[in-house]
Image (spheres, helix red, strand yellow):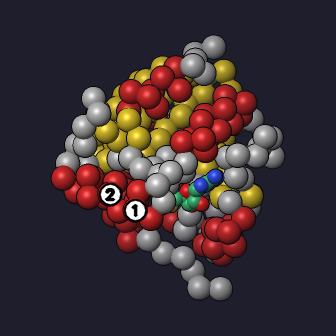
Amino acid sequence: MTMPFSQACENNKQPILEVLKTAFSNLDTVLEVGSGTGQHAVYMAEHLPHLVWQPSDQALYLEGVKARCHDYAGGNLNVPVELDVTQPLWRVDAVDGIFTANTLHIMSWMMVEDFFKGVGRTLSAQGKLCVYGPFNYNGQFTSESNQVFDGYLRQRNPDSGIRDFEVINQLAENLGLYLVTDHEMPANNRLLEWERRL
Ligand SMILES: C[S@@+](CC[C@H](N)C(=O)[O-])C[C@H]1O[C@@H](n2cnc3c(N)ncnc32)[C@H](O)[C@@H]1O
C-alpha cells in the first residue's frame, strides 16, 4: 500500500520529541491514540528507546500505521492496534503514558469525552497524558491562522473544531490529572502535559 505521509508531522515531530524527552522520561509504556500516518510513532520509538510505544488508530487508518511501523527495526514499537475512542472497552493494556496529536479538534465533542473516559480507564495512577494540537483560550483563537483552520474544520464536519483549553483541562482534572505544563509549540500549537495524582 502507499505509505501515508504528513508534512505537518515531519515539521512538528522534533519539537514534540523535545517535550516528550522530559515529560515521558520516567515512563515505560506509552499508548498513542490516533497515530494517523505512524510518523510520530516511529520517530518517538526511535528517539525514546527506554519506552515501549503502542500505536493505535481507527480501522480506516490502521493499515497505513501498520505499513509505516513495519520497517522499524527497534524492538520498542508494538504492532499498531485498532482503537476507536468510542469503544466502551479499549483493548489495550494499562499504560503509564498516553500521547495524542491533532485529534481532539477532529473528533466530535462526544468522542472527546469518550477519549477522556478511556484515558481514565487506561492510564496508571501516576501516569502522564500529553496532548498536542491547537487550543483556544478564554474563548479566543490564538492566531488568525487557527481561526481560518477552525472554519475549514467546521465546514467539513460541523461536529469538529478547535477545543477550549479550559474545558479540556476540566475533563482532565475530573480524572485526577493535573496540568504540569502547557508548552507553547511552533505554528500556534500547544502540548498539554498532565500528571495523574490518584
Ligand atoms: C488529523 S489526524 C492526526 C494524525 C496524527 N496523530 C498526526 O498528528 O498527524 C486525526 C486522527 O484522529 C483519529 N481519530 C478521529 N476520530 C477518532 C476516534 N473516534 N477514535 C480514534 N481515533 C480517532 C483519526 O483516525 C486520525 O488518525
Residue at 57% x, 80% y is 3
Q: Seen in the image, is 129 located left or right of residue 198?
A: left
Q: Seen in the image, is 181 located left or right of residue 84?
A: left
Residue at 61% x, 44% y is 111
Q: Seen in the image, is 184 located left or right of residue 1?
A: left
Label 2 is placed on what type of residue? Gly
Judging depth in this view, the residue of 119 and 39 nearest the camera is: 119
Q: Position of residue 158 (x, y in %)?
A: 46, 55
Q: Which residue is mark 1?
A: 155
Quadrant for residue 126, please give it.
top right
Judging depth in this view, the residue of 43 and 63 nearest the camera is: 63
Pointer 1 with pointer 2, Cβ within 8 A: yes
Mark 1 burial class by Cα count in 10 Å: few <14, some 14-19, many 20+: few
Mark 2 burial class by Cα count in 10 Å: few <14, some 14-19, many 20+: some
Q: Which residue is mark 2?
A: 151
User: SS class of the residue under badge 2?
Assistant: helix
Point out the residue furthest to the left here.
Answer: 144
